[in-house]
Amino acid sequence: MTLTLGALWVATLALLPLGYLYLTERGSPTLHVTIDPDYTVDLPDGRQIVVGDDVATLVNFAAGDEYRYLTHDSPPTLHTSMKIDREDTDTRILLVAWLATILGLAWFGWVNLQRVVRAARDDRPFDPRNPVRLRCLAGLVLASPVIAWAMSRTLDALFDGNPAAHVDLDGPGWWFSLTVGLGLLALAQVFGEGARLRELEETTV
């Protein structure tokens, strides 16, 4: 818990100068992107891969396994990193907002988790507030991929990339979020039932 808190504080403090550099166009942030067709990949040995909407044309490639792989079914997908242009202010502002959102959600999740653990250490595991805290954590986990998807689409609309590209934001996968989120909801149900039974016991006594 202490390590997690320390990491959150370091990330929060680092966001201040990082956000300043990004917003004043002094930094050089990069985004992970998927390049849209049409594009050309020039290899050091003189070979080229010319990718269109439905087909990849290979220049100076020998007919072999490599050739068959690159021309199989659909063109290869190119994942790379692109720097945000100094004049692309909208994307820079949105990127800082995204970093701040991640930190805000991380703080929210950590505080709720800390309160649940603290209640358990104080011999109050069935505190009536614990189920609510766990449901909040579950909602946060389940919403994470949706938030990342919405931010990616917004960055797509604002990012002035050349060539055109789709932004790929790193985030938890859908299956991971669904599994953890449902697990937390089940745990919240257990804590809620325990709190109800404890309240019933106290009322009866």
Image (spheres, rainbow, N blue to C red):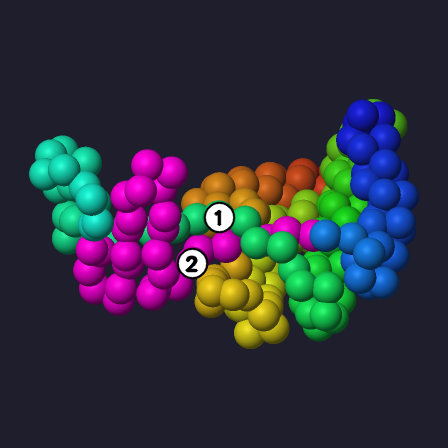
Image disc number at residue 35? 2
Element assignment for label 2: strand
Residue 52 in the figure: left or right of residue 67? right
For marks 1 and 2, give the CA distance: 8 Å
Amino acid marked by disc 2:
Ile
From where the camera sits, is residue 205 visible? no
Please tell me which residue lies in front, 174 or 43. Answer: 43
Mark number displayed over residue 80:
1
Confirm whether the magenta stretch covers residue 173: no
For the residues labelled 1 and 2, say whether their Cβ atoms are less than 8 Å apart.
yes
Q: Where is residue 7 in the image (x, y as percent from the top left)?
A: 80, 33
Which image quadrant: the N terminus?
A: top right
Q: Give the range drawn in magenta.
A: 29-57
| Residue 4 appears left or right of 151 | right
Considering only order in the chain, which callout, 2 or 1, is on the residue closer to the N terminus? 2
Of residues 133 and 83, which is closer to you in this image? Answer: 83
Mark 1 residue element: strand
Name the side, left or right, on which 84 lies relative to 178: right
Give the quarter of the figure containing the C terminus.
Answer: top right
Residue 91 position by quadrant: bottom right
State the image coordinates of residue 40 (x, y, percent, origin top left). Answer: 35, 56
Image side of residue 78 versus residue 30, left or right: left
Circle 2 Cα neighbour tier, 10 Å, few/some/many (<14 / 14–19 / ≥20):
many
Instruction: Residue at 28%, 50% (x, y): give it.
Output: 49
